[in-house]
Amino acid sequence: MDQLKSDLAQVVRLALFQQTEDVRLFVARLVRKYRNTDPNLAEIMDTYLQSHLPKPRSVMRKALSFHAPENQLMPADDESRLSLLKVFEDSPDCVTPLLSQELQQALEQLIQERQRADLLLSRGLQPARSAIFVGPPGVGKTLTARWLAAQLKLPLYILDLTAVMSSLLGRSGSNLRTALDFAKTRPCVLLLDEIDSIAKRRSDNSDVGELKRLVTVILQEVDAWPASSLLLAATNYPELIDPALWRRFDLTIEFKIPTLDTVELAINQFLDQDIENFRPWLKILTYAFQGQSFSDIEKEIQRFRRTVALHAVNPIELVEDLVRARAGMLDHHERINFAVLLAQGTRFSQHTISEITGVSRDTIRKHKSKN
Ligand SMILES: Nc1ncnc2c1ncn2[C@@H]1O[C@H](COP(=O)(O)OP(=O)(O)O)[C@@H](O)[C@H]1O
Ligand SMILES: [Mg+2]
């Protein structure tokens, strides 16, 4: 009886700590233990076990591209209990970001350096251990980190700086160190996302002491980073980054607002199955979206698609609204091109086009006849 009590207590303890895997192992042991002395109990437990088999790994991965691994103790801030690190384990064929040729080459090299590290080492060289992604918001820095980790078949840990910074200021340094230590103990890609929010210039006068400590922690980490893992950082504000930190990264990789060609590819990709509804206005959309980030384009296109799906709106109405909103953001030359495109591809009168774009009807007519 005493034995039974202590087994029961053990199950309760494991269950309350949500150590599912350990509960399973322990119960399997109990089934064997009680099979002879109490076959009924053993059978009931065995039935529960069989009906709660662990999900196959591959299914788990697909279903939950974002999850906390069951068996690892993830570092968390004591106070807020927010998980400091987000984990992504994407499969290598996850969505590929749209990137410029230049960027693709830089990333390809980064991947190859890791895949062929032996060759480099035999020549006394090391693969790049760290890189910093720079560029405006919404152009794929975080997405590319996910893609990169997936290509390298490594888990990606993203250091959630909101969690770090929201904790008591005085403890941010130790939180940061806990998270970095955790990531250092296993092969992975660690992304310090939006690093500008902590790595402000040391001359910044707000909470100088605390920020200095954080920067020092990061500086030490970048220097001591193991070659088995890749350290990435991303920032929307390169000018806020301390030059001393900047220099320590092996590579700087620049992300830019998409070019006109890439905007068209992005629109195609984001429209997905609704592409046919919008095909006649693809060029006009491309023009209207130029200068915008991928993320803004995606949001607007998603809104279009929802509106068309719900309200049977003619897509041209959405295109026209967009055009009105965007015409004001173009320079003189772009406006003329835009006006001509509108004259050829929409039901706007030349009068309206002229009004929207500020290009005279004469100019529109002249350029139209040239095409
Ligand atoms: N280069 C890109 N190719 C395809 N989609 C993109 C790209 N950049 C951004 N997006 C879309 O915008 C979203 C936000 O991008 P994100 O990577 O978070 O931008 P950043 O980190 O540069 O601010 C992505 O999840 C994706 O849907
Ligand atoms: Mg980002």
Image (cartoon, rainbow, N blue to C red):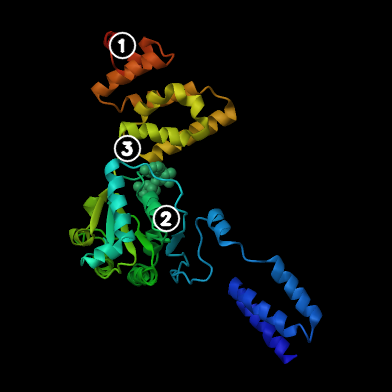
The amino acid at mark 2 is Ala
The nearer-to-camera label among 2 and 3 is 2
Q: Secondary structure at mark 2?
A: helix
CA gap between label 1 and label 3 equals 27 Å
Q: Position of residue 319 (x, y in %)?
A: 44, 24
Give yes or no for contact between labels 1 and 2 (Cβ–Cβ under 8 Å). no
CA gap between label 1 and label 2 equals 48 Å
Q: Position of residue 330 (x, y in %)?
A: 29, 26
Query: Which picture quadrant has residue 125?
Result: bottom left
CA gap between label 2 and label 3 equals 23 Å
Q: Secondary structure at mark 3?
A: loop
Q: Position of residue 153 (x, y in %)?
A: 42, 59
Q: Is residue 265 above or below residue 60?
A: above
Q: Position of residue 247 (x, y in %)?
A: 19, 59
The amino acid at mark 1 is Lys
Nearer to us in this view, 71 or 229:
229
Sequence-first tag of 1 and 3 = 3
- Residue shown at 34% from the left, 26% from the top: 287
Sequence-first tag of 2 and 3 = 2
Q: Does ligand 1 reach within 8 Å of label 3's beta carbon?
A: yes
Q: How many marks?
A: 3
Q: Does ligand 1 reach within 8 Å of label 1's beta carbon?
A: no
- Name the residue carrying label 3: 258
Q: Does ligand 1 reach within 8 Å of label 2's beta carbon?
A: no
- Name the residue carrying label 2: 150
Q: Is residue 74 left or right of residue 195?
A: right
